[in-house]
Image (spheres, rainbow, N blue to C red):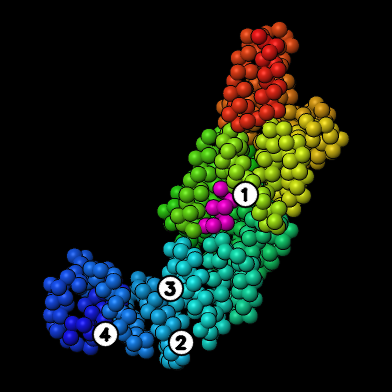
Amino acid sequence: DEKSLLQNAAVLGKLFWLGAAVALAEVERWAAEERLHALERKEFLRRERRTSVAGEVEYAFRHLLVRDVAYGQIPRATRAEKHRVAARWIESLGRPEDHAEMLAHHYLRVLELSRAVGQVAPDVVDPARAALTEAGDRASSLNACAAAVRFYDEALALGFRDRVDEARVRFQRGKALHLAGREDPERALEEAREALLESGDSERAGEADALLAELWWHRGDRERSARHLDRARATVEALPPSAGKAHVLSQVSRYCMLADENEEAVRIGSEALAMAEALGLDELRAHALDNIGTAKVNLGDASGLADLERSLEIAVAARSPEASRAANNLGVTTWMLGDIRRSIVFIDEAVAIAERLGNSPLGKYSRLIQVAQRIRVGDWDDGLQRADEFLAACDDGEQHYLEPDIRSRRAVARLARDDVDGALDDIRKALPAARRAGDPQALVPTLAAATRLLVWVGDTDEAASLAREALAMDPPSWTLIDLGWVAGDVHCAEELAEALERHRLPTKWTDAARALLRDDFRAAADVFYDIGELHDEALARLRAAAQLVADGRRAEADEQLQRSLVFWRSVGATRYIREGEALLAKTA
């Protein structure tokens, strides 16, 4: 009858198909069509103009309440059997990848309802496990990592007869946990690695270690990251070309680049790229090009930007979460080259891509770069609020690679607002965090920022020691700009000038640092404006005004002061407002 058909349709959900209703109701197709037509006339259902299942007529409940009431009238044990029939009908359609989540839903309902009545049929377990695994794989391919974890958890709860299959699912689950930014992915990945090695899958075991290396790098623990990376490389070294081996090699290239071992990064990255191209692996092509491009820019080769742009293009076309890292690194490299405004566009894009394509660790990383950018360009209300929230978590024990950078930026703002103790606290905490992170790109800017702040609060001895440490690492100019402000105070002007000469790709940062070394603050301010570094522009104009007042050039001094004070007043920088207004009085 019509009521029975309505209940059977309700098992399928808000939408259902004629073939499924026939299978559940166990009636002839013509009879089901007649009853469905009658239900249409009574406005319980409507026939859809398009169908989501090829060759099937699709119907929808007009009101969800009707569907829910009809479903609720079915006894639990009967519901379980009907969901099982629905699952079999879906399996009969073929193309399991197209219906993976729908199939998994019905098997999950079978399991839940069967458990509720204390009886799970043994012959349900194997097809349910297979369906849940397929749904997890499908969700992973769509970057729906939280859904993938849920499906994998359900599959693992059913147990596996084949340890190879179980190890693979554990690995996929650990990877999804990592990308989703969930708690404790390291435990899942460690367990997956052990299971993979026991089952003889060295390729994925190496990938698990590569993911663990990434996890610990994001947490600012270079030593643990390096241990996992070395282990990953050793695991896949003797293997023939494969996706897993290409992934590990590309990760090795990445961490060589981050360690400023750029020639090695290009060499290993090129090996990974060739392997990815031979195997037709677009996501890994993008990953390798990202590393190669960034390393080239570090070496002074601006053609690396084209590699980064190609990486982003490939990753976006492949709908890969790797696109967020490519956009992030384009943002970082354009900042390194002296264009903060363009850098902001790329970093904002990286955040949007990470949210859209499911890369939680990179999304958090790029959002923290946004925080530093906001402070640099004068959006202190947003930047400092976000910095406070992040650093409060760090004070509670959270570790992150960008902690030293955010602490250094907040210290600059705190000093500007006359919070000397707060600024010193940030710098004291930033230094050990930067040493733990280990990479020159994390350590050198922190050393330079600490040098500058310590000089300005009167601790030149420690500042000089930190300046020498920074210069000994022979870093690029963008990491050393803070030293330009205080090079004379810590007696490193000659060493800094030599470091700038050695820089392989001169940038606007180089020009700004040289202007600071000449005490040409007006020129430095103009360069900082071109870069988009508004804090240092305002500070340079303040210093230029002091020079002009001393030279008796009051009108020119007033112009520089007014431009400087506009910024300081907008951010509430009382230290520099007071200094500027004192100079302003002298120009009156």
Between 554 and 463, which is closer to the camera in this rendering? 554
Crowdedness of circle 4 by 10 Å Cα count: few (<14), some, many (20+)?
many
State the separation of the CA atoms marked 1 and 4: 54 Å
Give the mark nearer the N terminus: 1 vs 2: 2
State the separation of the CA atoms marked 1 and 2: 44 Å
Give the mark nearer the N terminus: 1 vs 3: 3
Q: SS of the residue at dot 2? A: helix
Mark 3 highlights which residue? 135
Total marks in image: 4
Which residues fall within the magenta stretch?
Answer: 359-367
Looking at the rendered structure, which numbered label has been put on residue 115? 2
Please name the residue shown 63% across and 50% down the image.
390
> Given the image, on which type of amino acid does mark 4 rest?
Leu
Tags 1 and 3 in contact by the CB under 8 Å rule? no
Mark 1 or mark 4, which is nearer to you? 1
Looking at the rendered structure, which numbered label has been put on residue 24? 4
Is residue 236 something that shows in the picture? no
Magenta stretch: residue 13 in it? no
> Given the image, on which type of amino acid does mark 3 rest?
Ala
Give the mark nearer the N terminus: 2 vs 4: 4
Q: SS of the residue at dot 3? A: helix
Is residue 416 depicted above or below 304 in this figure? above
Indicate the position of residue 164 as horizontal and vertical percent values: 55, 80
> Given the image, on which type of amino acid does mark 2 rest?
Arg
Please name the residue shown 56% across and 48% down the image.
366
Magenta stretch: residue 365 in it? yes
Mark 1 highlights which residue? 389
Indicate the position of residue 535 as horizontal and vertical percent values: 63, 30
> In which quadrant will I find the C terminus?
top right
